[in-house]
Amino acid sequence: MSRNFFRLEYPIKISAVSYSNTVPFIYGLRNHAIIKQIDLSLDNPADCASKLLNKEVDLGLVPVAIIPQLLDPHIVSDFCIGADGAVETVCLFSDVPLNEIQEVLLDYQSRTSVQLVRYLAENSWHISPKWTSASADFIQEIGGTTAGVVIGDRAFDLLQKHRYVIDLSEEWKKHTGLPFVFACWVSRRELSPDFVSEFNRALSSGLENREKAVAESGVSSAHDLVRYVQNVISYDLDDKKRLAMKLFLDWMSKSG
């Protein structure tokens, strides 16, 4: 019996996260023949999510928290943005201990991390701060009893600035014993197996050439970025990560 795949006109529109953790993915896509079949845009995670939800793109590296909002989501790759322990770039920054935090500013670029900090507050830390959706300049407002969730490359600059740095992925691992998945490659409908196969080859090629990808990325702190993409970010969407993703999304569905 034939299957009805998502028949798209080329180029296939793809939105990918613009943070340093995607450098190997972007390198792989841009240095593979598949680049001729795609229209690639680089966005922050919230914009990746919005583009896929609004049908502005066909495929996106999107926060896992939005998957339940899609009518017919398909995870098209065995690669993701994940971590098995500390991730360094998804943190709660505070000048006071967890039990003294009164307000948490929530990064406007994030969806998954916003839900993750709520999960940890409820299930691990047992605190009930005021949750505030943050504006673009919210990082300057972190201080006193007001903490903030900051994601992506901006978090690097804050690691030495605040007294308490709570790595959300590390806290998840402590509480569940599992790795965490922040984003994965999702399409709105089922794509052609031939395209998916080539797409995954391109991603795999990028991961196999991480040092070269970093060298050609133009990022000034190349040595640190090599360490980050080699040893910190975990890119394989394996069984443990799929289990973790199910646990997280199940909690989201119950928490409303």
Image (tube, rainbow, N blue to C red):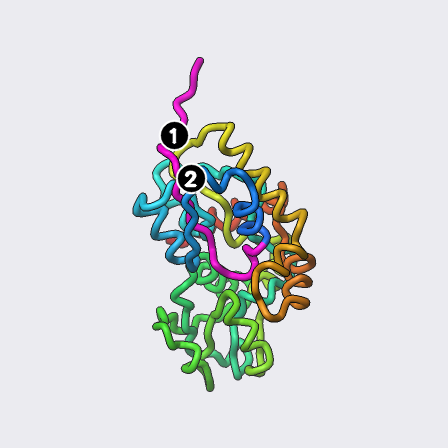
Does residue 186 lie above or below 148 as drawn? above
Where does residue 211 sit, x and y in percent of width and height?
67, 57
The picture places residue 40, in percent across and down from the top left corner, at 43, 48
Q: State if disc 2 and disc 1 touch (CB < 8 Å).
A: yes
For residue 253, say whether it is visible.
no
Q: Residue 252, position in %: x, y?
A: 43, 52
Magenta residues (range): 1-23
Front position in the image: 233 or 162: 233
The answer to whether residue 158 is seen in the rendering is yes
Regarding mark 1 in the picture, which secondary structure is present there?
Answer: loop
Instruction: Please tell me how crowded label 1 is: few (under 14), some (14-19), or many (20+) other residues with Cα within 10 Å.
Output: few
Give the residue at mark 1. 6
The residue where tag 2 is placed is 187
Q: Quadrant of residue 166?
A: bottom right
The amino acid marked with disc number 1 is: Phe
Residue beneath the point at 40% across and 53% down: 48
